[in-house]
Amino acid sequence: MVNQITGFSSTQQPSMPNKGNDTAKSASFDAELLRAKGTNIAPDSAQIKVAASASMPVIQTDKGGLATNLDDYFSNEPNSDGFLSLGELPPIFLPSGENIQALTEHVSSRFSQMLDDYNIPVAPDKITYDAQGKIQIPLSYPYAAELKQALDENPGIKRELSTINALSSHYVEMQRRVPFTEEMNGASSKMAVERIIKKYSHLLNDNHSYSSLALHFSKEGAVSVKADGVSVAFS
């Protein structure tokens, strides 16, 4: 599937932004198809390699680690909506801590610059996403109209924020299941397995609750992620 997050269509998909958005959880990650672009680096130039590494982080995908030009991918230029064959489909960005850190660092600089460009003196405390994938700006934020206009005119930044939200949602839910997986791996009897399943049943049923996710901002525009009000450590 392709969507706004990939830049291939006009409809943005949500990904578990808040409690109650359970139906949006699984659909969004399947749509996390992001186009990765490589670069030509002279093998005998260490200086060029260092510069390229800083601007093109290695993003973990279903096809392995790929050096990705985030400036190009999350540009404001519209991508083609034409038909893509199976071989042309871009790799899927995985919800790893390293990926989310790379995107967060990248968008923080761009978001801060956007605030300056639009004379917005301070960033909102946070933004969230509703079940339709639309950004929710706090009603108390005095520059909501200006920020909405800025994001509409900078769709690359808007898509990158949405992508961070989507990947972070999946990362948080996967981390919640780590203790279950570890205990199941150590279970040595049917009774132990049944006890573990009962212990973590709140995470295993189809109607279980999801973490409430929000993108938080410093006054200058640096982005961080919180789940249920607690900062998420992507490690």
Image (spheres, rainbow, N blue to C red):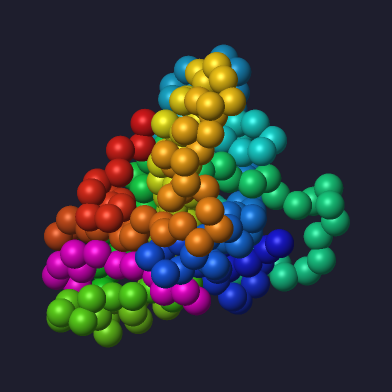
Residue 8 visible, this orientation: yes
How many discs appear?
0
Q: Position of residue 129 (x, y in %)?
A: 39, 70
Q: Which residues are magenta?
A: 120-132
Q: Please give the name of the residue rendered at 30% of the width and 38% of the height, measured from the top-left corner.
A: 233
The quadrant of the image that shows the C terminus is top left
Residue 1 is a magenta residue? no
- Point out the residue furthest to the bottom here: 145
Q: Main secondary structure of the magenta part?
A: loop
Q: Is residue 41 above or below residue 99?
A: above
Residue 45 visible, this orientation: no
Q: Please give the name of the residue rendered at 72% of the width and 70% of the height, measured from the top-left corner.
A: 81
- Point out the residue furthest to the front here: 191
Q: Please give the name of the residue rendered at 17% of the width and 77% of the height, measured from the top-left corner.
A: 141
Q: Please give the name of the residue rendered at 14% of the width and 60% of the height, measured from the top-left corner.
A: 219
The quadrant of the image that shows the N terminus is bottom right
Q: Is residue 218 above or below residue 129?
A: above
> Of residues 118 and 15, which is closer to you in this image?
15
> Of residues 212 and 72, which is closer to you in this image?
212
Q: Is residue 46 left or right of residue 142?
A: right
Q: Position of residue 12 (x, y in %)?
A: 55, 71
Q: Is residue 169 left or right of residue 4?
A: left
Q: Is residue 191 above or below residue 107?
A: above
Q: Position of residue 159 (x, y in %)?
A: 48, 63
Q: Position of residue 17 (x, y in %)?
A: 41, 63
